[in-house]
Image (cartoon, grey):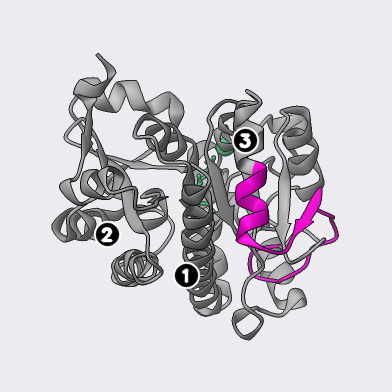
Amino acid sequence: MMMQYLKISKEVLDAIAKHIPVVALESTIISHGMPYPQNLKTALNCEKIIKDAGAMPATIAIIKGQLCVGLTKEELSYLAKAGKKVIKTSRRDIPVIVSKGLDGATTVSATMYIASLAGIAIFATGGIGGVHRGAELTMDISADLDEFSKTNVAVVCAGAKAILDLNKTLEYLETKGVPVIGYKTSILPAFYTRKSHCSVDYQMDSSEEIAKMLKVKWDLGLNGGVLITNPIPENASLDEKLMNDAIDKALTEAEEKGIKGKEITPYLLESVKNITEGKSLQANIQLVYNNCLLAAQIAKAYQKLQ
Ligand code: PSU
Ligand code: MN
């Protein structure tokens, strides 16, 4: 029943058959998170980094109403060029996009769900959505966080951006039973910078240690995701004051323009990029690569435990 909606590429199917570990990648980061042509170059490099590390990448998107796991170069190029014309698709949007036969760029929540349908347990991205600043009034809490409470996928990201309320994001994840792991750090990374003012639940120092914990979690029937936070490489990280000022400015701008709902995250990303004259985009690209590599290592360690 379910499988009629799913289209897994031959490359990914072959990898699954040969027990080659697979790493899922999202497509909102391509269509809404970065400008063309950097988005296409980044998407292609992510796939290459995962392959070079001995795993198989599976970029996920909805194309003409089909849940696609593993995209062709042409499909990646289309998503990158079409940009914001491709509908940003989180969990709630999936049935509408599929029933209408439309194209959708999947967010972390939708990508986790589709990855789980294909049996993929590890997913790499840049940043996840979270609890927005002022959420006590707006109730803007990303669907990504609830997805972690129900879908068995581990997501490697570079922590949470200061456009969000990091403390509230961690509180929400605790309520939902989601472990937050710091890779070689006890401090939650803040995306563009290696450190925030928050701690993670647990520090883990190897892919094997993380893979073992994932196996135990799911063996025990503790359904839901795990957030693995990986600090941006030192040489790509940005100055904390520069970033906080840029983010404050972007938030003020967004408020003045009345931007809200699903538009706010892409708006803030673009506005921070403009304020930092592209520095944030370069940092974003490097941290995504770093996450792809760690995700491939975790996927390999996890595969060995199967
Ligand atoms: N953070 C980034 N880049 C992104 C996103 C978040 O640095 O591209 C995207 C991801 O797809 C994430 C989504 O799942 O934004 C969250 O959107 P929202 O805040 O509307 O839930
Ligand atoms: Mn939101």
Instruction: Give the amino acid at mark 3.
Output: Leu
Q: Residues within 10 Å of mark 2 (few under 14, many from 20)?
A: many
Taking 250 as reference, is 15 above or below it? above
Residue at screen point 80% across, 51% down: 202
Front-most of residues 207 and 157: 207
Q: Which residue is mark 2?
A: 80
Query: What is the distance, in whole Å, between disc 1 and disc 2 at their CAs?
Result: 17 Å
The residue that appears at 60% across and 31% down in the rendered structure is 218
Q: Horizontal placement of 166 versus 27: left or right?
A: right
Q: Where 151 sits versus 209, above or below? A: above
Q: CA distance from mark 3 to mark 2?
A: 26 Å
Q: Amino acid at mark 1?
A: Tyr
- Which percent across, then down, holds residue 6? 24, 30
Amino acid type at mark 2: Ala
Q: Is residue 160 visible?
A: no
Magenta segment range? 190-213
Which residue position holds label 3? Answer: 145
- The answer to whether 108 is drawn above or below residue 222 in the figure is below
Residue 212 is one of the magenta-drawn residues: yes
**Residue mark closest to the camera, 3 vs 1:** 1
* Residue at the extreme top of the image, as rendered: 1
The quarter in which the N terminus is drawn is top left
